[in-house]
Image (tube, rainbow, N blue to C red):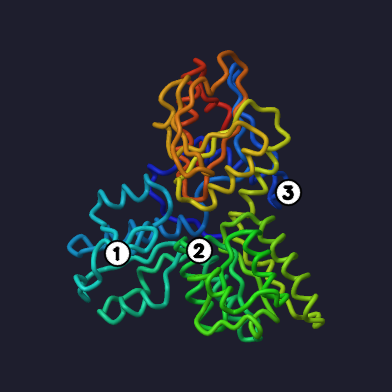
Amino acid sequence: MRSFEVPTFYRSPLISAIKQKRKAGDKLKKDFTPTCLDMGSLQIYLARHFGFCYGVENAIEIAFRTIEQNPDKRIFLLSEMIHNPLVNADLQQRGIRFLQDTKGKQLIPFETLTAADIVLIPAFGTTLDIEEKLRSIGIQLESYNTTCPFVEKVWNRSESIAQKEYTIVIHGKPSHEETRATFSHAAAHGPAVVIKDREQAERLARYVRKEASQTEFEIEFSGQFSAGFQINEHLKRIGVVNQTTMLASDTQGIADYLKEEVRKTNADPDAVADTRDTLCYATSDNQSAVMGMLETRADLALVVGGYNSSNTSHLFELLTEKFPTYYIDGPDRMESKNLIHHFDFFQGTEKTTGNYLPEDGPARILITSGASCPDAMVERILEKLASYYNVSLPYGEWELNG
C-alpha cells in the first residue's frame, strides 16, 4: 500500500515507531492485543490499530498539494475534508473555504463560483447531483476529488448488484455525507433504501413480509428511498452494503436478519447478494483492535476524534460497554488531572466530569483514535497524561525512525 506526503506536524515519531514495530512482528495482522507503555505509575495501552487511514492520508495529501500549487486561486472544499476539527481548521487557516456544512446546508452559493475556482471533493465523496452542478459551472473535479477508494468500492459494488436486479439496502446514517453520496450513486443504477440500525431493519422487514402498505413505507422511510420505490417489487431481492464506517458486527447482523426475512417470502437461494466486502479495511482493523482491548485490565478508556466522526463513535460504543470511556477531540479537553470535558455520544452533548483519573498509580488507561485523527494529537494526550503522573514517555525504548 502506497505512502502519502502528509505534513510532519500530523505525525508522531513515537507512535510511528510503535506502529512500525508492531507491523514488523505481525505482518498478517492477527495480533490485536494493545501495546503497553509501562511507566510505573502510568500504564498506557495503545490499540493495535488506530489513526489516519489510507483514504484520509490521500485526502490530506491532495488538499495540501492543491494549496501549495495554486497560491493565486480561490480554493473551496465542498464540506469538511474529514471529520477532524484540527485538520479542517488547518485547511481554513490556509485559505480554504467550505461551501456546505456536514448536513449539506449551503454556506456559500454555488452561483458565486466560477470556472477558474478549485473545488475539493471530500473523502466521503458527494452526490451525482452536486457533481453535475459543479461541472455545469465549468469546474474541473478530477484532479481535486479526494473520495476514498474504499467508498468508491462500495459505489462500484452497488452498481454491480443493481445490474443483477438487486435492490441496494445501505446500512448508514441517513444524514451523513458518505451515506448521502453512496445513496446517490446506488440510486442511479437501481432501487435503493437507507436503514440506520437494526430497529429500522426490523421495520423494513414488515414491508418484506407485506404486513404494511406502500403508503406507510413512504411515510416511515421518508427521504431514505429512491424515486419509484415499490415495496412489492423491490424487496424481493436485496443486497446490504455498509456506509464503510458502521460497526461491522451491526452490518453483518442486519444482513443476516434481512436475508432470513427475504427468504421467507422468496425461496430463490440467490435472493440476497453477498456483500461482505463493503466494510473499509481501516474501520474493520480499528474495530478489531478495540475488541482486542476489551480483556485488558484498565481503569478507563480515552477515544480521540471528531465528535461527528462515524468510525470514531463506534469505537466509543464498543469500549463504553465495559469501561468508563471518555470521547474527546483533543488534549485541550483534559483540563487537569481532575477535570475532563468530553462528548456524550448517546445524548449528543458535551459533559464535564471530575476525578476521572485514578489518584494513585498504577493508572491503567486504554487509548484509541478514529481514522481521521492525527497521531500527533494522540502523542500530545500521552504527554499530558505522563505529566499528571510525573513520568516520562518511553521514547528511548523505541527506535524513532518514523
Q: Amino acid at mark 1?
A: Gln
Amino acid on which disc 3 is placed: Lys
Query: Residue 57 in the image: x percent, y percent?
Result: 46, 55
Answer with left or right where residue 251 lies relative to residue 77. right
Q: Are marks 2 and 1 in contact (CB under 8 Å)?
A: no
Along the line of sight, the residue nearer the viewer: 183 or 223: 223
Give neighbour class at mark 2: few <14, some 14-19, many 20+ (Cα, 10 Å).
some
Residue where numbered disc 3 is placed: 30
Q: Quadrant of residue 134?
A: bottom left
Q: Is residue 283 above or below residue 401?
A: below
Please name the residue that numbered disc 2 is placed on. 174
Please give the label number shown on residue 296: none
Quadrant including the N terminus:
bottom right
| Relative side of 165 to 370, left or right | right
Marked residue nearer the N-terminal end (1 or 3): 3
The percent position of residue 185, horizontal first and vertical second, equals 49, 76
In space, the residues marked 2 and 1 are separated at their CA atoms by 18 Å
| Above or below 14: residue 189 | below
At x 62%, y 63%, the residue is: 200
Q: Nearer the viewer, mark 3 or mark 2?
A: 2
Mark seen at residue 106: 1
Out of 332 and 36, give the one closest to the viewer.
332
Q: Quadrant of residue 154?
A: bottom right
- Residue 102 pos. (x, y %): 39, 58
Q: Earlier in the sequence, mark 2 or mark 1?
A: 1
Cα–Cα span, label 1 and label 3: 45 Å
Kind of residue indicated by mark 2: Pro
Question: Which circle's residue, 3 or 2, is located before the other in the chain?
Answer: 3
Q: Secondary structure at mark 3?
A: loop
Label 2 SS = loop
Q: Secondary structure at mark 1?
A: loop
Alpha carbons under labels 3 and 2: distance apart: 33 Å
